[in-house]
Image (spheres, rainbow, N blue to C red):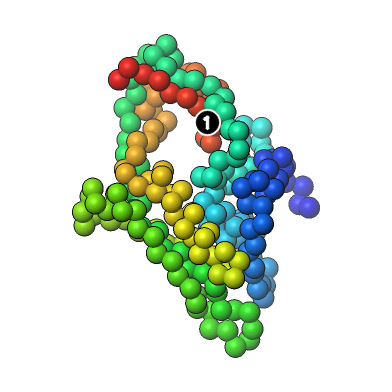
């Protein structure tokens, strides 16, 4: 409606695919800031984020992949001049989602009536007392509409990416100061699925 170019094909594929039948219920008393609302209340509780691709389209990614996703490219020994040095992603092994916001009437307390806390046992066992918690305040998630399932699913998807201090690559890690080693990566965008093979 605002004329913002969007990747409607991908958004519809998520709506009609992995999230078909997912219901979020909101009680709004005033217009929210659209971008913040979409990011915090629609995408984050479902394990997703919004970004702008190289075509200038607003699009989304979720930790839950679309069916039949295939690699758009491959990185291997002939692609990198140098072996990239990886950083370490921030660990998240505890996720708390608060939902069932009590704001449906004038007498509402504006408190969350339900909460689900998930711990990633393998990560907690490996790192002992070292834990990192992510809290998600999901105003539209309702226990009557699979709220506890949504909380558990989002948590396990986050654990699969961040539960073990997984590797991450910044803009310099794919080749350091050698321009030839990272030029091929310009063909790809954040969110693209690629295959990686290397003897080391």
Residue 111 higher or lower than 56, as above or below: below
Q: Residue at x 52, y 60 (%)?
A: 149
Instruction: Please state if 153 lies on the left or on the right of 170 as rendered.
Output: right
Which is nearer the eye, 119 or 50? 119
Q: Is residue 109 above or below residue 83?
A: below
The spot of residue 171 in percent (x, y) is: 42, 31
**How crowded is the residue under tag 1: few (<14 C-alpha within 10 Å), some, or many (20+)?**
some
Q: Quadrant of the C terminus?
A: top left
The residue lying at 37 percent from left, 36 percent from top is 168
Residue at image point 60% right, 60% down: 37
The one nearer the camera, 67 or 59, is 67
User: Disc 1 marks which residue?
Assistant: 193
The reply to whether residue 67 is in sight is yes
Q: Nearer the viewer, residue 170 or 111?
A: 111
Horizontally, is 172 left or right of 194 in the view? Answer: left
Residue drawn 34% across the image and 24% down it: 84
Residue 54 sits in quarter: top right
- In the picture as drawn, the residue positioned furthest to the bottom comes out as 107
Q: Is residue 124 left or right of residue 65?
A: left
Q: Does any portion of residue 6 appear in the rendered image? A: no
Q: In the image, is residue 149 above or below residue 178?
A: below
Kind of element beneath mark 1: loop
- Counting every numbered tag in the picture gives 1
Q: Position of residue 49 (x, y in %)?
A: 55, 48
Q: In the picture, residue 79 is in which quadrant?
A: top left
Q: Residue furthest left?
A: 128
- Residue 5 location in percent, x, y? 72, 42
Which quadrant of the figure has residue 142?
bottom right
Which x, y percent locates residue 192? 54, 32
């Amino acid at each position: 409606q605002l004329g913002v170019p969007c990747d409607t094909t991908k958004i519809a594929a998520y709506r009609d695919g992995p999230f078909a039948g997912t219901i979020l219920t909101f009680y709004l008393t005033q217009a929210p800031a659209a971008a913040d609302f979409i990011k915090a209340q629609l995408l984050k509780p479902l394990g997703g984020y919004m970004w702008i691709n190289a075509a200038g389209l607003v699009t989304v990614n979720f930790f839950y992949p679309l069916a039949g996703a295939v690699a758009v490219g491959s990185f291997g020994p002939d692609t990198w001049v140098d072996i990239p040095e990886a950083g370490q992603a921030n660990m998240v092994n505890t996720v708390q989602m608060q939902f069932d916001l009590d704001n449906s009437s004038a007498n509402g307390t504006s408190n969350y009536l339900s909460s689900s806390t998930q711990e990633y046992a393998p990560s907690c066992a490996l790192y002992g007392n070292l834990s990192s918690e992510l809290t998600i305040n999901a105003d539209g998630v309702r226990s009557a509409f699979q709220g506890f399932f949504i909380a558990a699913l989002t948590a396990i998807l986050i654990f699969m990416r961040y539960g073990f201090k997984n590797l991450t690559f910044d803009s310099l890690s794919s080749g350091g100061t050698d321009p030839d080693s990272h030029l091929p990566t310009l063909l790809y965008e954040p969110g693209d699925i690629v295959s990686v093979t290397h003897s080391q």
